[in-house]
Amino acid sequence: MKRTMIALTAVSLAFTGCANMDETQRHTGTGAAIGAVAGAVLGAATASKSDRGKGAAIGAAAGAAIGAGGGYLWSKRMQEQKAAMEQATQGTGVEVTQTADNRLKLEIPSDVSFDSGSYAIRPSLRPVLDKLAAGLAEHAVTRVTIVGHTDSSGSDKINNPLSVKRAEAVRDYLVPRGVAASRIAVDGRGAREPLADNTTAEGRAKNRRVEIFIAEGQAAN
């Protein structure tokens, strides 16, 4: 079993350490390596003492296949959409990232999205949402979560519904452009999740924002 785990560790390093791999290949390799190790451990644990080596090998093969397949299907589509959104938002201040749980995240600051105390979409946000809507229409399996935030000015009684209305305004902009409302969830966090110090004007501006999360459904192929 010890030799099996050493071999699997080497496989993991080989998959994840190649500099000439693109992002899709690295995610695929990482998924395969993680799946192999997990499968080996489970296979050995569930096999009889005399068959642990065989169980580890079978588990590793199954885990690698599952891990590689899942990673590739996810990352290939997300990679394409991430690249498209990076291009569409270049120079706007919108930050496009991939989260730890493999969702695509657009963080839209106040100078692009909404004026203070308002949930009316600013003209500078519309081209970004137009591009986003086009990408979402092409990938119907994706699901969208829109989260609105405010700064700490005013009371929760004002900020909580305002943050929800900001998220709803983005949803209501996307729906007529081909994104089904059933694919979109909205949420408002009020002033509860600040990014910066609310005691400064600059900090409050950073905290007034909208976050859009895009996740691919399990049924993708």
Image (spheres, rainbow, N blue to C red):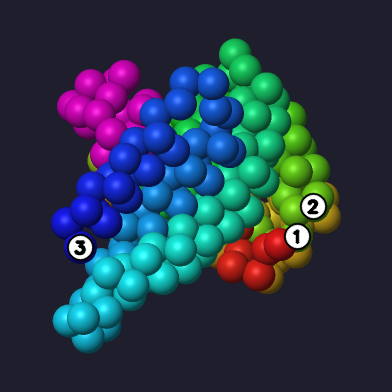
- The alpha-carbon separation of the residues under discs 2 and 1 comes to 6 Å
Q: Residue at x 46, y 52 (%)?
A: 32
Check the image and report above or below for 57 versus 50: above
Q: Nearer the viewer, mark 2 or mark 3?
A: 3
Residue placed most toward the observer, 205 or 46? 46
Q: Amino acid at mark 1?
A: Ala
- The alpha-carbon separation of the residues under discs 3 and 1 comes to 44 Å
Q: Find residue 1 and name its label.
A: 3
Residue 121: % across, % down: 63, 38
Q: Along the horizontal axis of the image, is 87 left or right of 28? A: right
Q: Residue at x 48, y 43 (%)?
A: 29
Q: Along the horizontal axis of the image, is 181 left or right of 118? A: right
Instruction: Tell me which label, 2 or 3, sits earlier in the chain.
Output: 3
Tags 2 and 3 in contact by the CB under 8 Å rule?
Answer: no
Q: Amino acid at mark 2?
A: Ala
Residue placed most toward the observer, 29 or 129? 29
Residue placed most toward the observer, 102 or 96? 102
- The alpha-carbon separation of the residues under discs 2 and 3 comes to 49 Å
Tags 2 and 1 in contact by the CB under 8 Å rule?
Answer: yes
Q: Find residue 137 and name its label.
A: 2
Q: Residue at x 58, y 38 (%)?
A: 24
Q: Please rate how many residues cluster around mark 3, counting C-alpha atoms within 10 Å: few if below 14, some from 14 to 19, many from 20.
A: some
- The range drawn in magenta is 193-215
Residue 54: % across, % down: 33, 72
Q: Find residue 140 and name its label.
A: 1
Check the image and report above or below for 1 versus 206: below
Check the image and report above or below for 170 versus 59: above
Q: Along the horizontal axis of the image, is 154 left or right of 2? A: right
Q: Please rate how many residues cluster around mark 1, counting C-alpha atoms within 10 Å: few if below 14, some from 14 to 19, many from 20.
A: some
- The quadrant in which residue 208 appears is top left
Determine the secondary structure under disc 1: loop
Where is the N terminus found, in terms of image quarters? bottom left
